[in-house]
Image: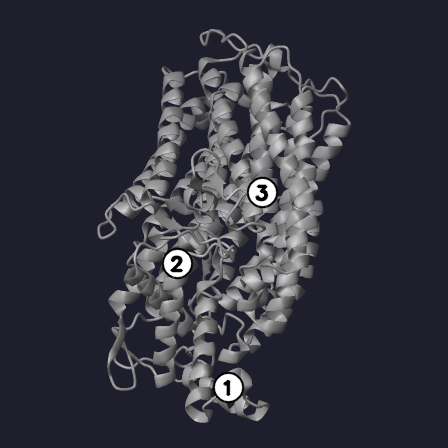
């Protein structure tokens, strides 16, 4: 089947417009139909229990003190602590049971005979069902008012006074009053999880979390759209295979091709400057893996590290110095930073390689961008620590502007986020300067343009992170947060991957430019056509309108199609590598590119699609199954591509090349990731899924679950995989440091490049 580049470009524009219309309408609905924050919550006698200001103050405490990276809200966040929505709903239900048992029968609920417990259960469910606010006021029954007060005091003891057993440091929340405000906020999310949306027979969260005692069970739409998604899953796989085999796409091949050797290609000053992105990323990566090992161990010893509760000689409490929430915040941010650093560096290294063009002062600007990136990274990470330790005025705005905004993946303060956004824009400008010869002669849908579009889309989606403040309704906040997180991962990042891989293959002379452009356009169309609206599977349980259930089911399933393409590409790239011979100089970068494609299919495809079936996701949401999916997709797909590009950059910039240590690191990472995901993380997730189905979601996220002997054994089983990943990263960092001492001499940028790929890339092939 013949499809032209121009046709694909037009289709991509149409997909962009459709996405814009659908998601723009979704944004309007998000504000219109978000769960209401009441003016007041009152008891049966009209006394005020809490106000809307209390709820919003509690959300600010939740963000400022990093509680989203200790536990989760509405299933989103960390899994070390409880889900605060499910936890407060369960605590509220238990307290209401005790209240009615004492009031009606003068006994504890657990001591009642079955028929009386059933009567109490019926009263509790009736109270919880009758929660619709009138004129901005939520009216509690006496049992609900009693339960609200009880939950507040539980949260004071847990999050202000601290709990070694739960891994909560003393003073995690500064004061008792702020702990009560946090409880008010969490109880409000529990309220709209059990209160029916006006005009519907289910709650604002589609009756999530699973809590039969509170009346929360999966609705009919969850089952219906799960069945439809299963049908689409099979059909989507077939469509993906059919498209790949039907559309005329060239495959990379080294047979009969004059592959340029790195030593025969001039090294220009801006490329030498871009090399320094690699050691910076290596240090960030090493720090991230070390923190990852600490986080994994915290699930075994929640207040110590291999028996050490205090640091010898200093007397500093380990839990107070680096609690789980802080370690996880840095772990996530470091992961984003090192991958982004390598992508930015590679994006600045490739243009001179392809064009032989060195703009004036380009090397100086590249060094300036790297310096600014280091300042933003250090400032952001330090700001998080200072914000969490109360350095900034809690009553003002500095804590979320300079410190810790406290939302998963968007933890750094707004000022540092602005710095990152400006960095992306500067990078786009520098990349455009380097690609100028190509941009002037190719069509708007050419490969150089695609690189800029992909990078620009990352910056554009990041702007969604500026659409909310700590005072914004949590449902609306989550709507915009997922624009950044999901649309990066399932849209812009995938777009960037296919564009960079295509440009790399062309630079190796393994693929013709126009063939690469066609492949990138097609895959970008499939990625952006399914991945953007596919974000809606994150909206099912957070208080968003019902329309996202069918949309999320359909488009999340269709995201399989581009992943089928990526898998086929990985297979074809492996064939090209296998037939390249021992003299092929880019074996290691090719290995990383292939691994990225395979892990992308495994992590985003196999592990992603089964947990995104609505019925599975209803019970699985916020469990270790998501952890497995996230690690395999983020590190496996995006991390390996970044490391492949780093290896490619090193291959050109280092003399007396040896890839022995990098090859060892490659296998340590791959085997370690497989052991971590398949031996430890996924088995824990399946046990959580069973527990959520049989006992309720709060039980699956409880301390009792994590302390089960089998679960603890599975946590220990993660040690070999984690150790291999850390060892691979340490070896990579050492190898990078060693290679920096053997850098090639920079060539004169005024010389005419002698390398083949430059001429081939600038030529208009047919």
Classify mark 3: helix, strand or loop: loop
| Whole-percent x, y for residue 138 in the image | 31, 79
Look at mark 3 in the image and give the residue it sits on: 306
Look at mark 1 in the image and give the residue it sits on: 121
Q: Nearer the viewer, residue 728 or 711?
A: 711
Is mark 3 in CB contact (under 8 Å) with mark 1?
A: no
Q: Nearer the viewer, residue 661 or 492?
A: 661
Does 631 sit above or below residue 558?
above
**Disc with the residue nearer the chain's start (3 vs 1):** 1
| Whole-percent x, y for residue 483 in the image | 43, 52
Q: Quadrant of residue 218?
A: bottom right
Classify mark 2: helix, strand or loop: helix
| Whole-percent x, y for residue 629 in the image | 60, 51
Identify the residue at image location x=54%, y=12%. 741
C-alpha gap between disc 3 and disc 1: 44 Å
Q: How many marks?
A: 3
Quadrant location of the C terminus in the rendered image? top right
- The residue carrying pointer 1 sits among few (fewer than 14), some (14 to 19) or many (20 or more) residues within 10 Å by Cα, namely many
**Disc with the residue nearer the chain's start (3 vs 2):** 2
| Whole-percent x, y for residue 711 in the image | 65, 57
Report whether residue 309 is seen: yes
Does 458 sit above or below residue 554?
above
**Disc with the residue nearer the chain's start (2 vs 1):** 1
Q: Nearer the viewer, residue 45 or 280?
A: 45
Q: Nearer the viewer, residue 180 or 563?
A: 180
Mark toward the viewer: 2 or 1: 2
Classify mark 1: helix, strand or loop: helix
Look at mark 2 in the image and give the residue it sits on: 159
- The colour scheme used here is one colour
Which circle marks residue 16 in the picture? none
Q: Quadrant of residue 626?
A: bottom right
């Amino acid at each position: 089947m013949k499809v032209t580049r121009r046709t694909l470009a037009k289709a991509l524009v149409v997909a962009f417009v459709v996405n814009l219309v659908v998601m723009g309408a979704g944004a309007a609905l998000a504000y219109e139909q978000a769960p209401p924050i009441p003016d007041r919550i009152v008891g049966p006698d009209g006394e005020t229990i809490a106000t809307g200001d209390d709820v919003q103050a509690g959300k600010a405490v939740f963000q400022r003190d990093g509680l989203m990276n200790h536990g989760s809200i509405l299933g989103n966040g960390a899994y070390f602590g409880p889900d605060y929505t499910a936890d407060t709903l369960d605590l509220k239900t238990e307290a209401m049971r005790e209240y009615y048992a004492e009031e009606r029968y003068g006994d504890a609920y657990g001591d009642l005979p079955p028929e009386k417990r059933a009567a109490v259960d019926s009263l509790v469910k009736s109270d919880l069902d009758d929660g619709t606010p009138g004129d901005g006021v939520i009216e509690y029954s006496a049992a609900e008012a009693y339960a609200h007060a009880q939950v507040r005091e539980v949260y004071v003891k847990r999050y202000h006074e601290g709990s070694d057993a739960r891994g909560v440091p003393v003073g995690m929340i500064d004061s008792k009053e702020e702990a009560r405000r946090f409880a008010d906020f969490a109880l409000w999310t529990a309220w709209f999880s059990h209160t029916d949306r006006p005009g519907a027979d289910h709650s604002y969260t589609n009756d999530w979390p699973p809590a039969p005692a509170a009346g929360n069970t999966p609705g009919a739409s969850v089952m219906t759209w799960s069945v439809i998604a299963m049908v689409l899953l099979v059909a989507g796989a077939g469509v993906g295979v059919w498209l790949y085999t039907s559309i005329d796409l060239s495959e990379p091949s080294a047979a009969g091709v004059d592959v340029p050797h790195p030593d025969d290609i001039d090294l220009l000053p801006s490329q030498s400057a871009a090399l320094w992105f690699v050691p910076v990323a290596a240090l960030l990566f090493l720090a991230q893996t070390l923190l990852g090992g600490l986080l994994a161990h915290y699930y075994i010893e929640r207040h110590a590290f291999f028996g050490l509760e205090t640091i010898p000689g200093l007397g500093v409490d380990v839990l107070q110095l680096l609690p789980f929430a802080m370690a996880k915040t840095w772990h996530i941010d470091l992961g984003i930073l090192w991958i982004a650093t390598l992508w930015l560096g590679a994006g600045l290294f490739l243009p001179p390689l392809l064009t032989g063009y060195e703009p004036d002062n380009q090397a100086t600007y590249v060094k300036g961008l790297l310096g600014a990136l280091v300042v933003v990274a250090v400032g952001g990470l330090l700001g998080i620590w200072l914000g969490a330790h109360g350095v900034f005025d809690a009553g003002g705005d500095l804590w979320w502007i300079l410190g810790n905004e406290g939302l998963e993946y968007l933890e750094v303060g707004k000022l540092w986020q602005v710095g990152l956004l400006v960095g992306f824009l500067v990078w786009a400008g520098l990349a455009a300067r380097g690609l100028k010869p190509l941009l002037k002669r190719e069509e708007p849908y050419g490969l150089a343009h695609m690189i800029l579009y992909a990078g620009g889309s990352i910056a554009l989606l990041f702007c969604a992170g500026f659409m909310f403040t700590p005072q914004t309704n949590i449902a609306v906040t989550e709507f915009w947060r997922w624009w950044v997180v999901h649309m990066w991962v399932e849209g812009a990042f995938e777009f960037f991957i296919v564009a960079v891989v295509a440009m790399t293959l062309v630079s190796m002379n393994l693929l013709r430019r126009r063939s690469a452009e066609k492949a990138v356009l097609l895959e970008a169309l499939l990625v952006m056509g399914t991945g953007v609206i596919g974000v809606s599977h994150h909206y099912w349980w957070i208080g968003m309108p019902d329309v996202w259930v069918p949309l999320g089911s359909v488009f999340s399933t269709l995201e399989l199609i581009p992943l089928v393409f990526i898998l086929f590409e990985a297979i074809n790239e492996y064939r090209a590598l296998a037939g390249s011979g021992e003299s092929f100089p880019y074996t290691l970068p090719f290995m990383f590119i292939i691994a990225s494609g395979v892990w992308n299919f495994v992590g985003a495809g196999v592990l992603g699609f089964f947990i995104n079936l609505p019925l599975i996701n209803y019970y699985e949401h916020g469990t270790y199954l998501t952890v497995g999916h996230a690690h395999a997709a983020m590190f496996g797909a995006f991390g390996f591509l970044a490391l492949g590009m780093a290896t490619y950059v090193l291959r050109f910039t280092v003399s007396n090349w040896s890839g022995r240590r990098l090859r060892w690191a490659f296998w340590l990472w791959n085997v370690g990731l497989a052991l971590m995901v398949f031996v430890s993380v996924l088995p824990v997730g399946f046990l959580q899924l069973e527990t959520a189905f049989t006992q309720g979601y709060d039980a699956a996220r409880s301390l009792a679950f994590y302390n089960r002997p089998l679960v603890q054994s599975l946590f220990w089983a993660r040690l070999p995989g984690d150790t291999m990943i850390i060892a691979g990263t340490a070896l990579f960092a050492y190898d990078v440091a060693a290679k920096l001492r053997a850098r090639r001499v920079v060539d004169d940028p005024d010389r005419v490049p002698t390398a083949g790929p430059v001429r081939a890339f600038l030529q208009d092939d047919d």
